[in-house]
Amino acid sequence: MNKLITEPTHRFLRACYGLPTDYTPIWMMRQAGRYLPEYQAVRSRLGFLDLCKTPDLAAEVTVQPIDRLGVDAAILFADILLICQAMGQHLEFTAGHGPRLEPVASESDIERLVVPDPTDECGFVMETVSEVRRRLAGKVPLIGFAGAPFTVATYMVEGGSSKSFSNLKRMMFAEPALYRRLLDKITEATTLYLEAQVEAGAEALQIFDSWAGALTAPDFRAHALPYVQRMVESLSNKDVPVIYYVGQAAHLIEPMVESGAEVLGVDWRLPLSEARRRIGGRAAVQGNLDPCVLLGPVELIEERARAVLEEAGPKPGHIFNLGHGILPETSPSHAKALVDTVHEYRRQAPA
Amino acid sequence: MNKLITEPTHRFLRACYGLPTDYTPIWMMRQAGRYLPEYQAVRSRLGFLDLCKTPDLAAEVTVQPIDRLGVDAAILFADILLICQAMGQHLEFTAGHGPRLEPVASESDIERLVVPDPTDECGFVMETVSEVRRRLAGKVPLIGFAGAPFTVATYMVEGGSSKSFSNLKRMMFAEPALYRRLLDKITEATTLYLEAQVEAGAEALQIFDSWAGALTAPDFRAHALPYVQRMVESLSNKDVPVIYYVGQAAHLIEPMVESGAEVLGVDWRLPLSEARRRIGGRAAVQGNLDPCVLLGPVELIEERARAVLEEAGPKPGHIFNLGHGILPETSPSHAKALVDTVHEYRRQAPA
């Protein structure tokens, strides 16, 4: 938190830096997404990747949940796998099957991957960032994002989603030099990509390590964390907070602190009281409602939201979020009920 | 552990009850499976479900890893979803897609499910148990098993594998009476099924709660644990130890103790030293090598196996296992190297 020069005024950015806020800010992972009819309306006109690559429409869906739900931050509409395509890997999204990539398996596959100039290969993302900033006009901050190297590598090596990540882990255990070469390259590409997002106007960054929870703490320290540390260190001369989200990280919170990120995002498995105790004031926390709770009745949503806020406690430095992306089957009115509950819960005196 | 009348002699059963053993016993989840060429040879002749239902061949594949690897226990070749079929749900296994079930969604779907007499509907399982006991001739104990009600319900309601378990969790949050009715029925059927396995000759039982790690600790206590407690309580008049395995349970070990099971099985995310500290001597532990380690070189397997044994410490009451099923791409020689490493590590003086 040594890069903070002047105190930000928006409650989301203040919470990132552990500063007091009038109430707990909230945003939701995948808040620009399929649960919103206005998103579906846009999406019906073009494919997922095409939408990512059409700045005007990507900006439109980025802003939709701000208007509809009143969340305290916008997150760029994009995908963590855009970087794979920019690095030269074939990528497609097929309806019902998720992402498909030509798996990276050999040394020559890795050597063929390029570290692209993000403004060339992902110029559409930077245009979206600029367009979103124009549309938001300072109403809420915009979060840029990328996948963490380990998580991106799972897709690159498995060729898509996986349960066991056995191909990547095999490489990690059996061909460690190859593994490092791949992760180094992803790290380099992703760092440039995130720097470009900040230059285009992103006011905070989230690094998604959705699958690093599949590692033991020693393996996480050896094979995932160092790449994130390097990214966070490189980004430290940019004046934006970094949020490091790890899925299923109940056993990883101590090494996550060593990432250097201002905010650590966790899922519902780890109670926030325990997260904060183990973090010991060295980072703010983000989370952590089970997104399935939003499928229950509004009274349950209110009760569970308040339980998360109680767990987080009155100390500043909590950003409310789900523990994973909002589910497509969620009713927008339930998402709105969550935002309202969080906003009404504890209105602290502004600093 | 109050049901122990006479001390068992086999090291696997002794370890289940926390008694000293000459060395740490080991078996592997899915040890009767696709990584073995002799399994593939049998499997090439018939489908997966047909193999489960052919006692002679199911017994053959159950015994294969005992001969090949020298593990200290056999586990019945069967599937946790056989109970769904016995309860009247349509089930099929399609190559590459895993299990497919006709999803249970409504009250009438649940009412249609029956609590079968396991010797009628799953007689082939009991025949397999008897046949395995004959073939083993006391060499190693035979473990019977079933899925825990929550985990079985994920398949019944989702209609197969799932990432978010959103349909079952929606039922849990939005239709709690329906959820309880379903779980009660699964619990009743599964208890009878496990009792029948013991009567047929199973000498220990494992309850697989592979997906309960997707619940917060409060939800686990409210919506998964009570059904397991009821099963363990019902089984307590049988003279066999119960192993309760929960995947991704780093945040659940305290409530798992309340299951009443003699042994708690955990995956690689939770270090065994921490598991044992939090269990506080109230149960033995089983685990917990990452199955992907077996894809690495033998030196790494030896090093990591010893690290697990160090974490478990010298106190009796540790059964070595993987943290999840052995992967189909594992080399049998690597699996054998693991067994040998564990057996050679620490030969305690027999009690």
Image: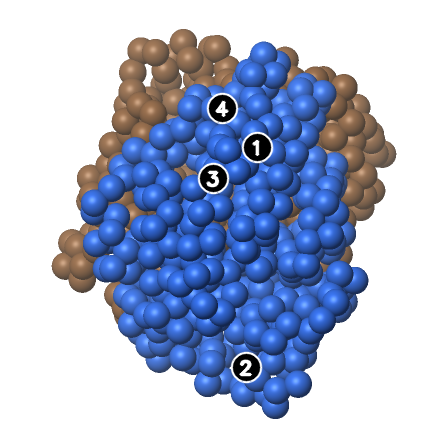
Chain colours: A blue, B brown
- Callout 4 amino acid: Gly
Residue type indicated by callout 2: Tyr
Query: Would you place residue B272 above or below residue B129 in this image?
Result: below
Residue B298 seen: yes
Dot 2 corresponds to which residue? A23
User: Label 2 lies in what chain?
Assistant: A
Tag 1: amino acid? Asp
Chain on which label 3 sits: A
Give coordinates of residue B17: x percent, y percent. 67, 47
Q: Residue at point 36% right, 65% down?
A: A65
Same chain? Circles 3 and 1: yes
Quarter of the picture containing the N terminus of chain B is bottom right
SS at mark 4? loop
Left/right of residue B348 with respect to residue A343 in the rendered view: right
Decide: marks 4, 2 in contact (CB < 8 A)? no
Quickly name the residue at label 3: A123
Give how far across and how far down residue B303 sits, in percent: 78, 27
Residue annotated with mark 1: A117
Nearest to viewer (mark 4 / mark 3): 3
